[in-house]
Image (cartoon, rainbow, N blue to C red):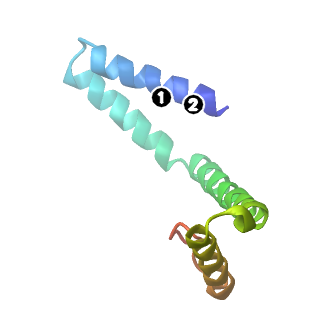
Amino acid sequence: MRYRLTFIAGLALGYVLGTKAGRERYEQLRKSARQVAQNPAVRNTAESAAQQSRRFAGRAYHAVSEKVGDHMPDSVAGRVRSLRERSAHNGGGEDDWGTSNT
């Protein structure tokens, strides 16, 4: 699905950049894109995907840091430990990338 969306976005961008239709067609496409982006179903789907990706990234981060943390140089291992402690004390307010878990 992600590749389809990327392809469609690339196709639309190529059309806009390569078209000779002028400013009117560009404004029509822009208005359509804005309407799609403001659609509640699209917004809910995007938020759901963002939440899923944050959960997956958090699980992957902890799994990798547990398995690889002991085999890293001391400077890197110390950074991993500090990130673990920070995320444990954080209580879910922000993830390790500084974004809120909404």
Q: Is residue 10 left or right of residue 40?
A: left
Q: Are marks 1 and 2 in contact (CB under 8 Å)?
A: yes
Q: Is residue 24 above or below residue 81?
A: above
Which residue is farthest bottom? 89
Residue at image location 53% in from the left, 47% down from the top: 39
Label count reads 2
Residue 9 in the image: above or below residue 67: above
Single out the residue that lies furthest toward the top.
Answer: 20
> Is 79 left or right of 35, judged from the image as shown?
right
Task: Please name whichever residue, 24 or 50, is drawn nearer the observer in this view of the structure.
Answer: 50
- Residue drawn 53% across and 23% down? 7
Residue 94 lies in quadrant: bottom right
Residue pointed to by mark 2: 5
- Identified by mark 2, the residue type is Leu
Q: Which residue is mark 1?
A: 9
For this orientation, the residue located farthest to the front is 73
Residue found 25% across the figure and 14% down from its top: 21
Q: Nearer the viewer, residue 37 or 93?
A: 93
Picture quarter containing residue 100? bottom right
Q: Determine if residue 51 is in view.
A: yes
Q: Residue 2 placed where, x, y %? A: 63, 34
Would residue 68 appear left or right of 76 to someone viewing this image?
Answer: right
Quarter of the figure with the C terminus: bottom right
| Vertical relation: 49 (above or below) 19 | below
Disc number for residue 76: none
